[in-house]
Every structure is written in C-alpha cells, then in structure tokens.
Image (spheres, grey):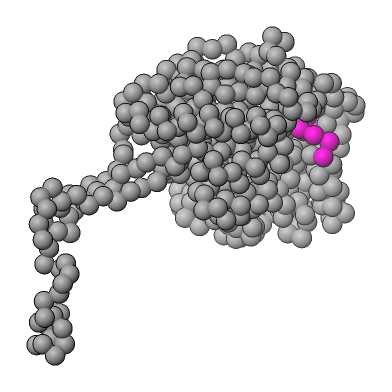
Amino acid sequence: MAAPLTPRFYVTPGFHPSAGAGRDVIDPATLEVVGQRADVTEPELATALGAVGRAQKAWAQVDAKSRAAMLHALAGRIETADHTDCAILMSREMGKPYPEAIGELANCAPIFRYYAEMARDEAGKLAGTTQAGSLQFAKYEPLGVSVHIMPFNFPILLMCWTVAAALAAGNGCVVKPAEATTLSTLEFMKVFDGLPEGLVACLPGGADLGAALVASEATHAVAFTGSVNAAQNVAAEAARRMKPAVIEAGGSDPMIISAHAPIDVAAAGAVTGAFHMSGQVCTSTERMFVVEEVHDAFVEAFAAETRRLRIGNGLERSEIGPLVSEAGRQKVERLVADAVAKGATVVCGGCIPEDQPVGWFYTPTILTDCTPDMALMQEECFGPVVAIMKVRDFDTAILEANASRFGLGACVFTTSLEEAHEAHARLEAGMVWINNPLIDNDALPFGGWKASGLGRELGRQGLDAFRRSKMVILDHKPVRQDWWYPYPDDWFLGSGGRKLS
C-alpha cells in the first residue's frame, strides 16, 4: 500500500503530522490493523480553523467565473487521478467491495462541475419593484466556514456532495471523516491541493471533535449524515447557535411489490435495494410489503436471486462484504432474533456464514411473516436483512409503508401507471423510486421527511443550504418619499381623518 497510514490531518495544500493520540484502524473482513488515524489536538483544530477562516474571506471575493474555473480544475484532477490506493483503503477500512469503492470515486467529479455552473448561473433574484425608481433584488452570499461530518458508508461521495456546494457558494470547508474511513478520506484529500491555501481541511477525530466543530464560533454551517440520535444532537446544538444545518439521519425504507410487478425484475431490484453494500446504505430496503396475489412467487424468486450473492472480503470477488464493526453485526443479530421470536420465518440467511469465521460477516437474510410489532419493522437495521410483510392490496401496502417514524426513501415495483402515480403522491418520503431503487441525480434534491432529516443535499436546494440571502433596495436617484416622517397633519384623526382606499 503506497498511501501513508500514519496519523495526519490535511489543510490545503498538504498533509501535516498530528500530535494527537493514534488509534488503530481495523479491517472488518480480516480484523487486521490497516493503519492509524489521529485524534487531532485542540491546538491543531484551532490552527486549521484559523487557516480555513482566513482563506474563506478571500475565496468569497473571487468572481463566479474564476471560482467556477477552479472547481472545474478540481473536477479534472479527480477525473485523471489514480484512485486505486484510495479505493483499496476504503475497502480495507469498512469492507465495501472494490468495484463499489472505485465506482464511488468515479462519481465525484460531476458534482463539482454541476455546482460550479449552478452557482455561476443563479446568484439572486430581481423582483418587481414596489416603488417607482427603485431597484429591488435579492442576492446570495456565503455563510462562512462549513463543517462536514461524514458517515462511513459513502465517505468520499457524500463529502463531495456538500463540499462542492459549499465551495461553489463561497465557503471554506472543514471535513470530519468517519472514524472508520479516515484513511481513505485523507488519501482523497490531495485532489484539493490546487485550491487556495487553507480553504479546505480534513481533521480526524471522534464524536468529541464533531461536537467541538459544531459548537465553535469559527464555523457557520453544518452538514451531517449519521444515526437519528446523533443527528438530533447535532441539529439541536446547531439550532442553539443559530447555524444552518443539513441533516441526513437515515431510514428504514419500504419497498412495495404490486400485483402488477414483473416478478423477475422486482426480485433482482430487491436484491440490490436490500443488500447493496451489505445493507449499510441509508436508503437500503429494510421493510417490504408484497401484495398477497404475488407474495409466494416473489419470495421464491427473491430468495433465488439472493442465494447467488457471494460473501467475502471486498478485495476478492464478492458482493457481500463484512459489516463495518462488531457492534453493527450485533445489532443485526438482535433484530433478527427478535423477529424470529415473534413469529418471523427465515427464508434464507439469518446467521454468520460458516466459511467466514473471521470478520464481521452476516449472510443476506430474508424474513417472511413479519408484523409491525417486530423491532426490525421499527428500527433502522443497517445490515443485510429485509423483513417481508404480506398485504391484502396496494392501498394497504401504502398505508403500512407510511407507518414509520422514518421517511427517507421508498420504492415500488409495478407496471400499473395508476399505481405509479398513486405511489409518488401518497408515500411519505423525501424520495420515491419506481422500478429502479437507490439511484440519485445531482440536479435533484436528496433528503428525507419525518425523523430522516432536515434540509436537502444536491440540486438547487443543496446549493442554497450553504448560502444566505440579502435583500437590497437601491434607489439610484435619491428623492424625499411622501410616506417619510413627519406625517402631514391631515393624516391624523381630528384633522379630517384621511380615509384608507
């Protein structure tokens, strides 16, 4: 492995050794030590925040065309860089299959190009005037220094989603990588070397560092992706300090299999929706509602597709890698045991694979006969497990899908145009996929309803999250207005009492 695996942090344009405590990074497939990450010290944090703050003030003054050119150059560096080491590190840190790791990195450049042009194209609004001779408009300005607290599952792509928007809006950025994927995140940071000195920092650490960044008076906006409990704490702290925050808090996404679904396509789509990255995706299918007319045929096809999946190290030929941690697997085991105890039937999986005695592996698991009282139907599992509930009809499926505190995404398989439109109109989720789970679009907002989050990433809303508006009233020819003080005497009662028209 060519990449340095020693404790360090990043501030544009390079790396710095950290004096903070070194912590081992463990490969969840082999339980071997991959390298060490740091917990940055308070002086290192203060120095980095000072550098980003100074750089941001200059960056905010760069004209939109020049700023866009620098972001396009950054995208070019991403496109031409050899990301092999970064992808290998990502797989070794959190178990993701190598094709998914290198694929994640390949999707990063377009978001910088998108926001480079979005920010250049749309910078405010000219309003119809309320008074003759007055130019009245709103313009956008950056918030300052934005904090980006990242998850382990898509450590690079999700960082790029919000960092690209923040930079395009004129902000400086401080990234706190997930503890599990610090090494790969740092390895990627070298693509930012061409930006102005100090503009972007990547500071490793744990929850205490994240809390310090959110609370700091030197930061002005927050982007967070993580668990609901952590998200609530971050959102509350940001609100106390009146900082705008984009919060993505995960979900327990439903999938509906209609009586009009093509069974073979739905089964294949369900495998990807439920088991992509071992189910460690915020939009993974966790609850499935299958209309009784096609239930048995679908379960049979779904199980057959699932049994084709290969379990193993992400650097070998496998679709199902390990869970990121022992705690992650223990949660999966708890939820499956609870469901079985309450009457669920294990169709396939439901155990630790015998041929993977080392590492945090778990077999792709399908459970049928599931009921709403099972913890698996109420909590986010974040593992390769899907709970299937047989329902009477499509309308019942919609009602059951909505019976959750989560509302991130939802998926439907159907060939009925009527059902497709009913689904996107009635499902209580920030995103709805019809016959094609999990995909996103840089130009469309990503985010959830209910407990699944606040604000949006991507699209125009993703850019607006990192800028604030300023209303401007500009009268180019100063004149005394008739409504200014002092009021004429005849405007008062007892002096003729001017009537309102």
Quadrant position of residue 50: top right
Q: Is residue 387 visible?
A: yes
With respect to residue 173, does 372 lie above or below? Answer: below
Q: Quadrant of the C terminus?
A: bottom left
With respect to residue 44, does 500 lie above or below? Answer: below
From the viewer's perspective, tell me whether residue 39 is left or right of residue 398. Answer: right
Taken as a whole, is the magenta stretch helix, strand or loop?
A: loop
Q: Is residue 435 visible?
A: no
From the viewer's perspective, tell me whether residue 298 is left or right of residue 329. Answer: left
Marks counted in the figure total 0
Most foreground residue, 355 or 293:
355
From the viewer's perspective, tell me whether residue 15 is left or right of residue 78. Answer: right
Q: In the image, is residue 326 part of the stretch drawn in magenta?
A: yes
Q: In the image, is residue 275 part of the stretch drawn in magenta?
A: no
Most foreground residue, 269 or 168:
168
| Magenta-tinted stretch | 319-327
Report x, y in % for residue 107.
Answer: 52, 24
Q: Residue furthest top?
A: 2
